[in-house]
Image (cartoon, helix red, strand yellow):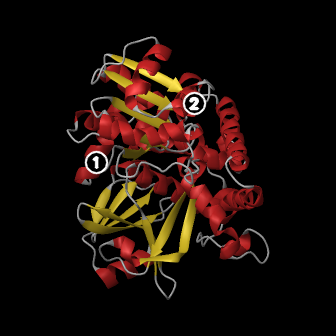
C-alpha cells in the first residue's frame, strides 16, 4: 500500500545533511512496513534487526555502541555485508534497547556514511533517559500516523477518484453527483475501517467488517497492555480512566476536554500526567484552543483549554462498539456522537499531513472547530457531519479577523461563495 511518508524517506536518503533516522508513532501504523518497502525500492539490500523478536540483539549493544564494533557484528547477524550508502540498516522496536538509541549519536559523528533508520512505538514514554541520553541534534525524526483518506482511497484502487477530488478542490468545481455519492460512501467506510494498515488491507481483500473489528479489538488490547507495561503502578489506572473518557466526551456538544468527566472531583493536577502519556504514545491527539488567530498560532494557545481526539476513527468506532451499519447508514441515535466523530476525522487528516490544528472560541461562546496555517494564512475551518452548513460561529470569526477565506467541511459538494470554500468531508486531506 502506498504511504506518503516514503517520499520523505527518499528526501532523507538524498540529503547531504542526512543523520540517522528515528521513525516513531503509535503501534500498528505501518512504520516497519514502510521502512522495509523503502529499503527494497531504494537500496541494494536491507539489514533488518528486531529487538522484540531477537532478545540477544540487545547484548550486542551492551558490549559497545561504537559503529566500528557494531557494523561487523551486525553484518554477521544479518549474514550480509553492510555497505555504506547501499545498505539500509533498520533497527526495529528500538524502545526496548536504549543503548541502541544512544548509538545513533556515534553513527552520526563517527560513521555518517552508513544509512541507519530506527523504528519504535512509545519512544516518548518508554525510554528511560536517566542513564543514557537521547541523541538530541544527532538524528532526523519523523512521526508516522494511520493512513489518511487519500491513502485509503489509493489502497482501494480509487486513483482516478483521488485526482478528481484534488481537481474539484483546487478549482471549487462541483463533483458529478454520482462520483460525489461514491466518495461519500468511501468516507463512511473509512470512518468504520480507519487507517490502520492491517485493517485497510483486510478491507481491500475481504470487505468483512467483522474481521476488521476483531483486528481493531486486538490493537486496542495492545494499547491497554502498553499502558501497563510502560507506566508506573500509580499511573496505570489514571491513564486508562482518561483514555476511556475520551470517547464519552466526544459525544457531548462541547467537546472541550473536561477533567471532571473522568471521575467525580477530578482535577488537572491529578490527571495531567496521564493525558501527557497518551499524547506522547501517539494514542491520542491534543488540539489546543487559541485566544486569538494571530501568527504564530502557538504563541496564542491556551494551555488549559484543549480537545482530545482518538488516533484512528476505526479504533474510535471499536471503542464505542458501533456496528458498521450504524455508521454507514443514517442513524438518528448517533446524532449526538456524529459531530465529535466528524471532528475527530478532520483532526486526524490534518495531523497526518504534518499540520498542527488549533480551535478558536470567543468569550461569548462562539467556536470554530479548527484553525490551521495554510499557504501563509491562518484558515478557520468549520466541520459538519451532514449538509447543514450554517455556521454562525464562523461568521463571527470572519467579521472579527477577516481571514483570506474560510472552509466549511460537510457532506455538501464543492463550491465557493461569500469568502467561504465548501468542501466535502472526503476532501479534508486536500487541506
Mark linked to residue 58: 2
The image shows residue 113, relative to residue 345, as above or below, that is above
In-front residue for pair 60/154: 60
- Residue appearing at x 71%, y 51% in the figure: 320
Residue lying furthest bottom in this view?
364
- Residue appearing at x 52%, y 60% in the figure: 343
Circle 1 is placed at which residue position? 168
Residue 178 seen in the figure:
no
* Sequence-first tag of 1 and 2: 2
Task: State if disc 2 and disc 1 touch (CB < 8 Å).
Answer: no
Mark linked to residue 410: none
Q: Which quadrant would the N terminus be assigned to in this image?
A: top left
Q: Horizontal placement of 176 versus 201: left or right?
A: left
Mark 2, secondary structure of its residue: helix
Image coordinates of residue 250 in percent, x first then y, are 63, 63
In-front residue for pair 240/89: 89
The image shows residue 422, relative to residue 106, as above or below, that is below
The image shows residue 315, relative to residue 62, as above or below, that is below
- Residue appearing at x 62%, y 63% in the figure: 275
* In this rendering, the label closer to the viewer, 1 or 2: 2
The image shows residue 229, relative to residue 85, as above or below, that is below
In the rendered image, which quarter is residue 420 located in? bottom left
Q: Which quadrant would the C terminus be assigned to in this image?
A: bottom left
Image coordinates of residue 53 in percent, x first then y, are 62, 25
Graded by Cα atoms within 10 Å as few (under 14), some (14 to 19) or many (20 or more), the crowding at tag 2 reads some
- Residue appearing at x 47%, y 28% in the figure: 33
In-front residue for pair 383/247: 247
Residue lying furthest left in this view?
16
Graded by Cα atoms within 10 Å as few (under 14), some (14 to 19) or many (20 or more), the crowding at tag 1 reads some
Q: CA distance from mark 1 to mark 2?
A: 52 Å
Image coordinates of residue 389 in percent, x first then y, are 44, 66
Amino acid at each position: 500500500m502506498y504511504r506518503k511518508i516514503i517520499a520523505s524517506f527518499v528526501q532523507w536518503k538524498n540529503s547531504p545533511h542526512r543523520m540517522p533516522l528515528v521513525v516513531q508513532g503509535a503501534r500498528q501504523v505501518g512504520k516497519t512496513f514502510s521502512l522495509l518497502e523503502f529499503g527494497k525500492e531504494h537500496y541494494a539490500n536491507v539489514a533488518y534487526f528486531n529487538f522484540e523478536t531477537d532478545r540477544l540483539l540487545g547484548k550486542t549493544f551492551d558490549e559497545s555502541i561504537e559503529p566500528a564494533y557494531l557494523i561487523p557484528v551486525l553484518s554477521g547477524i544479518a549474514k550480509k555485508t553492510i555497505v555504506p550508502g547501499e545498505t539500509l540498516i533498520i533497527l526495529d522496536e528500538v524502545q526496548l534497547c536504549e543503548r541502541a538509541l544512544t548509538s545513533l549519536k556515534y553513527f552520526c559523528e563517527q560513521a555518517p556514511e552508513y544509512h541507519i533508520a530506527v523504528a519504535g512505538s512509545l519512544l516518548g514514554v518508554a525510554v528511560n533517559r536517566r542513564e543514557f541520553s537521547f541523541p538530541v541534534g544527532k538524528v532526523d525524526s519523523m512521526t508516522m500516523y494511520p493512513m489518511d483518506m487519500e491513502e485509503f482511497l489509493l489502497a482501494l484502487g480509487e486513483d482516478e477518484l483521488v485526482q478528481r477530488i484534488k481537481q474539484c478542490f483546487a478549482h471549487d468545481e462541483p463533483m458529478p453527483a454520482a462520483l460525489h455519492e461514491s466518495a461519500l460512501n468511501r468516507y463512511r467506510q473509512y470512518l468504520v475501517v480507519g487507517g490502520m494498515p492491517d485493517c485497510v488491507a483486510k478491507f481491500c481483500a475481504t470487505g468483512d467488517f467483522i474481521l476488521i473489528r476483531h483486528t481493531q479489538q486486538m490493537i486496542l488490547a495492545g494499547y491497554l497492555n502498553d499502558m501497563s507495561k510502560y507506566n508506573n503502578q500509580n499511573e496505570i489506572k489514571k491513564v486508562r480512566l482518561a483514555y476511556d473518557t475520551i470517547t464519552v466526551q466526544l459525544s457531548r456538544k462541547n467537546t472541550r476536554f473536561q477533567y471532571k468527566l473522568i471521575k467525580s472531583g477530578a482535577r488537572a493536577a491529578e490527571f495531567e500526567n496521564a493525558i501527557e502519556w497518551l499524547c506522547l504514545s501517539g494514542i491520542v491527539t491534543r488540539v489546543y484552543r487559541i485566544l486569538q488567530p494571530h501568527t504564530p498560532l502557538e504563541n496564542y494557545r491556551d494551555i488549559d483549554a484543549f480537545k482530545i481526539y482518538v488516533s484512528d476513527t476505526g479504533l474510535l468506532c471499536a471503542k464505542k462498539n458501533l456496528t458498521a451499519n450504524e455508521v454507514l447508514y443514517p442513524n438518528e441515535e448517533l446524532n449526538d456522537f456524529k459531530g465529535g466523530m466528524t471532528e475527530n476525522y478532520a483532526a486526524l487528516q490534518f495531523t497526518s499531513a504534518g499540520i498542527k490544528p488549533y480551535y478558536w472560541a470567543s468569550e461569548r461562546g462562539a467556536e470554530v472547530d479548527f484553525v490551521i496555517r495554510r499557504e501563509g494564512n491562518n484558515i478557520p475551518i468549520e466541520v459538519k457531519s451532514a449538509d447543514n452548513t450554517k455556521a454562525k460561529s464562523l461568521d463571527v470569526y470572519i467579521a472579527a479577523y477577516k481571514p483570506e477565506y474560510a472552509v466549511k467541511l460537510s457532506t455538501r459538494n464543492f463550491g465557493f461563495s461569500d469568502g467561504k470554500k465548501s468542501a466535502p468531508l472526503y476532501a479534508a486531506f486536500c487541506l
